[in-house]
Image: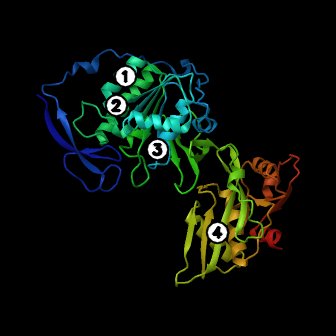
Amino acid sequence: MAKTKSVYVCSNCGNDSAKWLGKCPICGEWNTYVEELIAKESGSRRTDTLFDSPKAKPILLQDVKTGEEPRLDLNDGELNRVLGGGLVPGSLILLGGEPGIGKSTLILQTVLNLDSLKTLYVSGEESVRQLKLRADRINEKSQNCYIVCETNLQQIFVHIQNTKPELVVIDSIQTIFTEGIESSPGSVAQVRECSAAILKFAKETSTPVILIGHINKEGSIAGPKVLEHIVDTVLQFEGDQHYMYRILRGIKNRFGSTAELGIYEMRQNGLREVSNPSELLLTQNHEGLSGVSIAAAIEGVRPFLIETQALVSTAAYGTPQRSATGFDSRRMNMLLAVLEKRAGFKLIQKDVFLNIAGGLKVNDPAIDMAVISAVLSSSLDIAVERHVCMSGEVGLSGEIRPVNRIEQRILEAEKLGFSKILIPHNNLKGFTAKVNIEIIPVRKVEEAFRQLFG
């Protein structure tokens, strides 16, 4: 009979210890050790298996044949873009996000659009009736999608063997358990062993598997960190539940770029792809309003124009408030210091609030010029012209630094009907494209302010 003993395992890195530790000596995280029961096999293990003949033989690197990875079209332009062109056979995809953000809806409407692929949807959280109600709400009908409510990993493999699907979806990995581990579903050991078994199945049968994962209160995917290491792609589905837009980002991708971005609009009948986010992220009635400027940003290979809003008011308390939504607050403090030191605008006794419209989180430094323009517009109570947009990174000395792919930004602004665009002066080198939009090169923030406010 197998004996059981308890060990303490770090939920962040997977390191185990015979006793509980407050701080993990491997990864340095605090309060991450959880107790797990493991079964100790009776009898001695065979040691001669270490010297058995291996199944695979080493080969020279130059003898390995490579080619373009075949892709499965998911009939979803945004999801295909983030994955790098489609789904690679045999890949393991992990999709994480906040509760209720739309993870299950995104995957369900995607598989219901795939009539050419036999799909098995394994649900560990919802009943068959709940999935049917959601499918009816999405109004997508597929003749090739099988659903099963199961949490036992061994039974899931039996269903896979019987149906022989071409795509497997597991919702969610934290609800799946294997009988070989004596711990509850969602524990570090269960998630680790179940994901390793699913990975082995995906690689041996060349069947793509999509895992839906929960996240913890810190915002990272729940379970051991090894879960993110063994999968091929980690996708993050994010967005504010008070807004209609959802952002799909690639955190890790072995078959594509992690700089891609997919945008969806949440509707009553599911998620709608936003092919041109610029038109939806711009408010058309901001003419005459101060504190609003338009920035030409790029996420991945996609250019789009976003609206930057700022509000500057006299501080009601002793310490001025600094708040940024969708933008790095530390970078905003740096830009405010540049405005005060290099441009001579005193904002030390002012409250400054910054917002990126639409609930987006933007990391492109090219929106720096739009941020300081919106702040100054609100401080002076002078509106920026409606048909003017800008793109440029601001340095600590007040210079406007060049940005990448300026031609795409200019063409996007021209397509949306803007008549002027402010760009860094150094970006004009090598720019030969003929456009109908007026290009205004600037070297310093003072020049940009003269062009905007006179």
Q: What is the C-alpha distance between the residues marked 3 and 1?
A: 25 Å
Q: Are marks 3 and 4 in contact (CB under 8 Å)?
A: no
Looking at the image, residue 382 lies above or below residue 390: below
Residue 395 visible in the picture: no
Task: Give the residue at mark 3.
Answer: 96
Q: Are marks 4 and 2 in contact (CB under 8 Å)?
A: no
Looking at the image, residue 276 lies above or below residue 378: above
Q: Are marks 1 and 2 in contact (CB under 8 Å)?
A: yes
Mark 3 vs 4, N-terminal side: 3
Q: Identify the amino acid type marked 4.
A: Leu
Looking at the image, residue 5 lies above or below residue 89: below
Mark 4 vs 1, N-terminal side: 1
Q: In the rendered view, does 279 fall on the left or right side of 19?
A: right
Looking at the image, residue 205 lies above or below residue 181: above
Pointer 1: residues within 10 angstroms few (<14), some, or many (20+)? some
Task: Give the residue at mark 1.
Answer: 159
Mark 3 vs 1, N-terminal side: 3
Q: Identify the amino acid type marked 3.
A: Gly
Q: Identify the amino acid type marked 2.
A: Glu
User: Where is residue 375 drawn, in percent x and y?
Assistant: 68, 71
User: Where is residue 14 drawn, in percent x and y?
Assistant: 32, 43
Residue sitting at 24 percent across and 34 percent down?
Answer: 181
